[in-house]
Amino acid sequence: MTRRRWVYRKDEDGVMQAVEIMSDAELQMRVNAPVIGDMHYQDMRGPQGEDINSRTKHKEFLKSSGLALADDYKNEWAQAQKQRDAFQQGARSSERREQVARALHQVANR
């Protein structure tokens, strides 16, 4: 739960009004928070000075450069983790058995 601070001030008609206050630092932090918008793209440049100061330009730059963000592989990493877990649990495939048998055969026939 967010803590809030209030001050009671009289308005022009003399009626007391509750006004929420915060420090200038808190206000500036809220305005410049990168989560709010694309502030983290501000003044962003590529290695050759390309302007990539927006989310769209950044995605286009990554695509044209053959690069990717780690988030692009989230599903692949999850699938690979499932395969590793299955392997660790003993659910080994017949392909793996054949590879081990072939390796043993090669070592034995040297």
Image: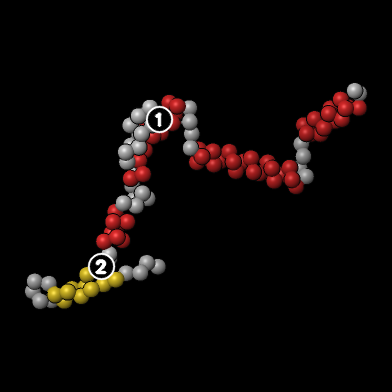
Q: Residue furthest front?
A: 48
Measured along the vertical axis of the image, is residue 4 above or below residue 77? below
Residue type, numbered disc 2: Ile
**Residue ID for mark 2:** 21
Q: Residue at x 10, y 76 (%)?
A: 14
Residue at (22, 70) in percent of width and height: 19
Quadrant in which the N terminus is drawn: bottom left
Q: Secondary structure at mark 1?
A: loop
Q: Residue at x 51, y 39 (%)?
A: 70
Q: CA distance from mark 2 to mark 1?
A: 43 Å
Q: Which amino acid type corresponds to the residue marked 1 in the rendered image?
A: Pro
Find residue 58 and report its image quarter. top left
Residue 54 visible here: no
Spot occupied by residue 24 in the image (x, y as percentages of width and height): 26, 61
Q: Is residue 54 above or below residue 8?
A: above
The residue drawn where x is 48% and y is 27% is: 66
Determine which quarter of the picture holds residue 45: top left
x and y, in percent, of residue 34 in the image: 36, 49
Q: Please tell me the numbered disc located at residue 102.
A: none
